[in-house]
Image (cartoon, rainbow, N blue to C red):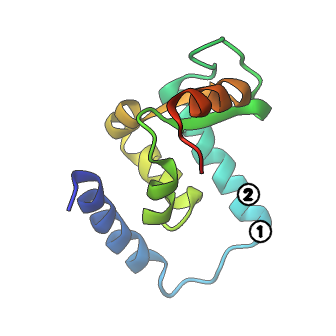
Amino acid sequence: MSELEKLYVYYDERYTKSWKNKKKPSSEYRKMRREKIKNKLYDILGNVCIRCGFSDKRALQFDHINGGGKREILLFKGNENMYRFYSKNPKDTKERLQVLCANCNWIKRDENGEHA
């Protein structure tokens, strides 16, 4: 089991226990919470594309530096859980994620053969 998988198992157990008996939040609340988590990640990683300097958040994306994003999303059972994990673990965030604009992210995917 990789280091990331061990961290995820630990995180998943803590998160599952804390939400097990609570009422499911509304979609508006979930959207607000997701934006708050993403903004925290932008604060950790920076608010601009590291390749071209583009800064409009509507087109910025979190990219896995060494690929494997799809596998990680499946491991965390969704983007929101993955973002939550990284927002609470800034050291891992800086090692594994970067901010790219949509264009640079697609160019990187093409250059590295990271096709879904």
Q: Is residue 111 left or right of residue 17?
A: right
Instruction: Assess disc 1: are there few (<14), some (14-19) or many (≥20) residues with their C-alpha within 10 Å of its C-alpha.
Output: few
Q: Amino acid at mark 1?
A: Ser
Location of residue 106 with respect to 75 vertically, above or below: above
Secondary structure of the residue carrying tag 1 is helix
Nearer-the-camera pick, 116 or 84: 116
Label 2, label 1: how many angstroms apart (C-alpha)? 6 Å
| Residue depicted at x 35% and y 32% | 95
Nearer-the-camera pick, 79 or 14: 79
Q: Which mark is residue 17?
A: none
Q: Position of residue 60 (x, y in %)?
A: 69, 31
Q: Position of residue 26 (x, y in %)?
A: 75, 72
- Judging by the rendered image, the residue that carries numbered circle 1 is 27
| Residue depicted at x 29% and y 60% | 5
- Judging by the rendered image, the residue that carries numbered circle 2 is 31
- The answer to which image quadrant residue 43 occupies is top right
Location of residue 20 with respect to 43 vertically, above or below: below
Q: Is residue 2 left or right of residue 86?
A: left
Q: Amino acid at mark 2?
A: Lys
Location of residue 9 with respect to 110 vertically, above or below: below
| Residue depicted at x 62% and y 37% | 39
Is label 2 in contact with label 1 (beta carbons under 8 Å)?
yes
Q: Position of residue 44 (x, y in %)?
A: 48, 29
**Farthest bottom residue?**
21
Q: Position of residue 87 (x, y in %)?
A: 46, 44
| Residue depicted at x 65% and y 55% | 33
